């Protein structure tokens, strides 16, 4: 390589001072790049947070529903037809619920699917009859007066 | 070389930049701006394109600083960013504006400035000849004559062997001698 060319190149390709405008451009570019990242964060916020909130609501609703399941499994009514209808559709127990003498039906409660209890108030006493799927009725009076409880229906 | 091996000041600046401190990045910019711009301009031969390249290089520097592990010297790492920014930019078409500017300058110049203008023209011809070299040869020439890097340093920046650098420079010299034989 010739010294002449070395000198020519060294003389022609000297370093230069960068224009002052370069910083403005770089700074603006950094600002734009930073701003471009914000929508991603905003997008994350926009979708991520609502999703998290929705998930929390669903979870809370599920928990609440589970906690409220026992009250929903009970039906309070003095209408024997309504109680019979509820038993058939909600508890899966198809049994006739008839009006009783000297008292009235107070409601029903599902023990599990196919098994329920029916509450009566007779002469100021609360009596409970357990009924099961298929129309089998098992008297389980909490008053100890099973015969009397049977007669609530069968005497009609 | 680890990051700890860097000079204390430079290490602190880089760490501050990694934390996103703009003032620290401004210090880094002021330290290296002339070097980055010089390479960009000498490589591209176009002031506007050089500004684009320099801007890209610094933006890349800003975004890549968290990735700098200190495996190589910071200056080498930064040179690579600039070189890549240069190679990423396609060459613009040859512009007539600089020639028009020169012509106007010659017409307006008093007689005692003629010699200076002729020298300036010679420099421009050399630069124009450099611009016709292939990207690899051109970059080797710029790093050698603008930045004064050694063959080994150029090899590290360009990711090739020192022998390859020597070969590129040798071929560049021969090509330039042919183009500038009339100067």
Image: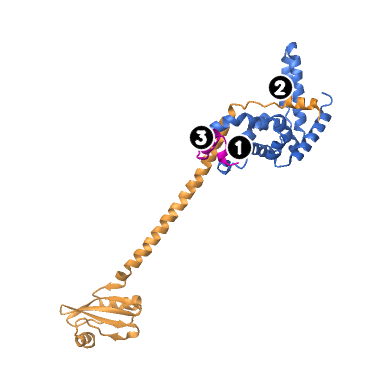
Chain colours: A orange, B blue
Task: Name the residue nearer the viewer: B64 or B156.
Answer: B156
Which numbered dot is residue B74? 1
Q: Are marks 3 and 2 in contact (CB under 8 Å)?
A: no
Query: Quick one: label 1 or label 2, which is nearer the N terminus?
Result: 1
Q: Rounded to the nearest whole Å, what is the CA distance between mark 1 and mark 2?
A: 38 Å
Residue A149 position within the rendered picture, expressed as x and y whole percent measured from the top left: 21, 85
Query: In this figure, which residue is indicated by the disc labeled 3?
Result: B22
Give, as a single range, the part of the protein colored magenta: B1-22
Let me know if residue B14 is in the magenta part: yes
> Residue at the spot x=31%, y=71% of the render?
A70
| Element marked by disc 3 | helix
**Lower position in the chain sequence, tag 3 or tag 2:** 3
* Chain of the residue displaying label 1: B
Point out the frontmost of discs 1 and 2: 1
Marks 1 & 2 on one chain = yes
Read off the residue under disc 2: B101
């Amino acid at each position: 390589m010739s010294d002449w060319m070395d000198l020519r190149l060294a003389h022609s390709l000297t370093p230069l001072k960068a224009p002052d405008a370069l910083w403005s451009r770089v700074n603006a570019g950094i600002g734009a790049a930073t701003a471009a990242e914000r929508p991603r964060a905003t997008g994350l916020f926009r979708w991520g947070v609502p999703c998290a909130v929705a998930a929390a609501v669903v979870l809370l609703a599920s928990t609440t529903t589970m906690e409220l399941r026992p009250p929903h499994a009970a039906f309070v009514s003095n209408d024997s037809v309504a109680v019979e209808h509820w038993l058939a559709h909600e508890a899966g127990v198809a049994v006739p619920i008839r009006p009783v003498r000297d008292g009235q039906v107070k409601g029903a409660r599902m023990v599990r699917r196919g098994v329920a209890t029916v509450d009566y108030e007779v002469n100021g006493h609360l009596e409970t009859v357990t009924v099961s799927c298929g129309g089998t009725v098992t008297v389980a009076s909490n008053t100890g007066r099973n015969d009397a409880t049977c007669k609530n229906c069968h005497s009609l | 070389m680890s990051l700890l091996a860097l000079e204390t000041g430079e290490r602190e600046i880089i760490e501050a930049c990694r934390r996103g401190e703009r003032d620290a990045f401004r210090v880094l910019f002021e330290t290296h701006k002339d070097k980055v711009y010089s390479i960009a301009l000498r490589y591209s031969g176009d002031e506007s394109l050089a500004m684009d390249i320099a801007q890209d290089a610094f933006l890349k520097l800003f975004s890549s600083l968290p990735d700098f592990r200190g495996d190589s010297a910071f200056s080498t790492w930064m040179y690579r960013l600039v070189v890549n920014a240069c190679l990423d930019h396609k060459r613009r078409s040859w512009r007539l504006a600089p020639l028009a500017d020169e012509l106007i300058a010659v017409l307006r110049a008093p007689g005692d400035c003629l010699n200076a203008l002729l020298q300036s023209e010679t420099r421009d011809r050399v630069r124009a000849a450099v611009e016709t070299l292939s990207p690899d040869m051109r970059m080797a020439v710029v790093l050698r004559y603008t930045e004064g890097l050694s063959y080994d340093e150029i090899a590290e920046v360009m990711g090739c062997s020192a022998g390859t650098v020597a070969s590129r420079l040798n071929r560049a010299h021969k090509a330039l001698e042919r183009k500038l034989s009339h100067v």
